[in-house]
Image: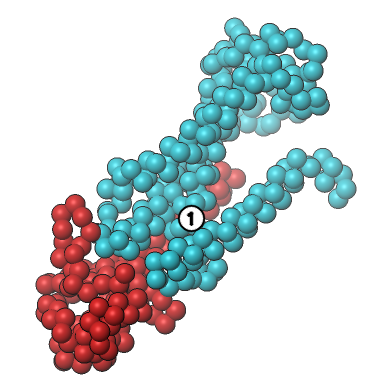
Chain colours: A red, B cyan
Amino acid sequence: MGTAGRYLSVAAAAATITVATACGAQPSPATSVARNFVAALDASDTATACGYLAPGTRSDLEKSAGKPCAAALAEEDLPAAGAVENTDAFGTMAQVRFAQDTMFLAEFKDGWKVMAAGCAPEPGHPYDCQLQGG
Amino acid sequence: MRRFVRECSLSLFFGVIFIGALVGQAVAGWHQFNSDQLAEGLGQISLGRYLTSADFAVDVTENWQSEYLQFLLYIVATVWLVQRGSPESKKVGDAGLESPQQQKLGRYADDESPAWAKVGGIRMTVFSWSLSLLMAAIFLVSWFVQSVGGWATYNETRLQRMQDPLRWSQYLRDADFWSRTLQNWQSEFLAVGSMAVLSIYLRQRGSPESKPVGAPHASTGVEG
């Protein structure tokens, strides 16, 4: 292989690594956390569900409700999410679409956490979320 | 070794400062990324993770693609376009690919000419265009990597704002991609154009990028 061929191979490898890095961020862990959050809510286990919330989201929920997370989350009446339809993950953020809900998750040192849930699309605008951090 | 350093000091100098600047960019970019994450109440990442992130990839390659495009356009444009008085230009009237004799091709090559300048055929043609071909290839690959890295980092931002991510094909038509691309292109074109014009009237003693200090402003294609 000539010099030009070697350079092109390196460039192709670099491009492949970049695509893999950009596209291959962990959809499975984010999807698992979202599913576990939904499962905890379906089982009315809001204490466990609170463990899956991002710190900012949990803090804002408790402040706005004026009560601990488990009690505040029980009063949120989030929609039944249904089955996972699609997950998109880019860097430290992910969007998990369920049949009847959309959630946004963020990656922290201790894993993926739910940043926003009960999100409905607003054409031309950000999602309107029932539960979200500031 | 000393001879190597002395005879290759130009490339060694730029190689060292390139690596230094890249390392500095990586550290500064990592701190900036984490600062933005903290401000948004999001998780921070390690330097190692940042170095493999789309954010770092796009910040590096958006600059690389414009530099190689700049060189590609300059190398090719100076074949056919001239600037009277500029040391960066061929003499007025010499525009074009020039004769085989002027370019030492085929039977006009001498003993020290590269082999592919003598052989003729496709190899001679490829070698005749090898500099612009490689610049074009590096430009296209780094622009592609910029597009993928930019797409990923833009979508990460969109998700932070509770917006749907874009497909890559949508991102190629998005203002973020073209803003990143064109902000780099304009500066490169300005720099090259400035060099071509300023070197008509200004001098740097000892530099091959300048005319000799005493050379007339109207002299074209003369190096110091």
Residue on which disc 1 sits: B57
Q: Judging from the image, what secondary structure is the residue with disc 1 in?
A: helix
User: Measuring 54% from the left and 63% from the top, which residue is drawn there?
Assistant: B31
Chain letter of disc 1 in the image: B
- The three-letter amino acid code for the residue at tag 1 is Ala
Indicate whether B156 appears above or below A134: above
Which of the 4 quarters of the picture holds residue A40? bottom left
Indicate whether B38 appears above or below B13: below
| In the image: residue A44, left or right of residue B25 | left
Indicate whether B210 appears above or below A30: above
User: Measuring 56% from the left and 33% from the top, which residue is drawn there?
Assistant: B71
Q: Nearer the viewer, residue A57 or A99?
A: A57
> Residue B14 appears at what percent x and percent y?
70, 44
Which of the 4 quarters of the picture holds residue A130? bottom left
Q: Is residue A9 visible?
A: no
Residue lying at the far front of the rendered structure = A66
> Residue A39 appears at what percent x and percent y?
19, 86
